[in-house]
Image (cartoon, rainbow, N blue to C red):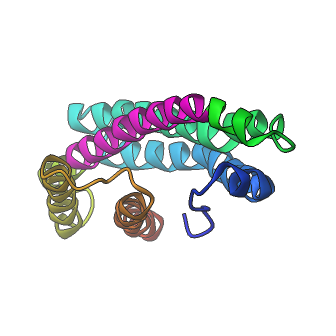
Amino acid sequence: MVLHPAGGSVEHLIRITRVIVITHAIAIISLPFGRIGFWGLTRRIGTDHFGSVIAMVIASFGLVAVMLAGAANGLIMPIFLQYYKDATPESIAAIKPVLQYSYAVNHAFDYIYTGAFSLAILCWSGSIVYTRKLAVWIGWVGIVLALAIVAVFVSGVAVNSLHGFRIFGTAVIAWILVVGVMLRNQK
């Protein structure tokens, strides 16, 4: 997300196409590795524990949603815009509704991803507190994090804006990294 380019005019987006594609490709390529880590967490808590397994399933849906958001915004849109790099201002104006639709589709996937990850973290965290297979404090931190994300979302703050998504991503990644270190250290 640090590398994620901010929006701008169509002309600006056309100029930074390479950056857009590279940053989104890196994000998409990293998703299977996240999935493997989630499987490790699920196994550690126990595949016989419903909360752990449902968290894995929900997180998997979230990963598919974020992959689709990344593909729409980071691959499809830049490829589409390349056809208009020498377009007239009238042509650019004509494609703006298409770009607005793409933006709306991307937001829908962002909402799915945000909701799925919040719910998955809540389920894993509840399972951690219940089973005590990891430090209980990280379970409570995850519960507070998930509930805070839901509260922010319900209050109308745009978690799917670039700034909001960076905050959400940082919080979720911090929780995941701490859990990953715990998993690694408990082997």
Q: Is residue 79 above or below residue 145?
A: above
Q: Is residue 123 magenta?
A: yes
Q: Is residue 19 left or right of residue 96?
A: right
Prevalent SS, magenta region: helix
- Residue 110: image location, x then y, percent: 41, 41
* Nearer to the camera, 11 or 67: 11
Q: Is residue 49 above or below residue 36?
A: above
Q: Is residue 186 left or right of residue 16?
A: left
- Residue 79: image location, x then y, percent: 78, 37
- Residue 13: image location, x then y, percent: 69, 53
* Nearer to the camera, 41 or 120: 120
Q: Is residue 162 above or below residue 116?
A: below
> Splitting the image into 4 quarters, where does residue 117 fall?
top left
At horizontal 46% and vertical 42% (from top left) the residue drawn is 39
Q: Is residue 76 left or right of residue 163?
A: right
Q: Is residue 112 magenta?
A: yes
At horizontal 20% and vertical 60% (from top left) the residue drawn is 139
* Nearer to the camera, 50 or 76: 76
* Nearer to the camera, 155 or 99: 99
- The residue most toward the right is 86
At horizontal 75% and vertical 33% (from top left) the residue drawn is 80
> Splitting the image into 4 quarters, where does residue 58 fall?
top left
- The residue most toward the front is 90
Number of dots carrying numbers: 0
- Residue 25: image location, x then y, percent: 71, 48
Q: Is residue 31 left or right of residue 49?
A: right
**Image quadrant in which the N terminus is located:** bottom right
What segment carries the magenta color? 96-124
> Splitting the image into 4 quarters, where does residue 173 fall?
bottom left
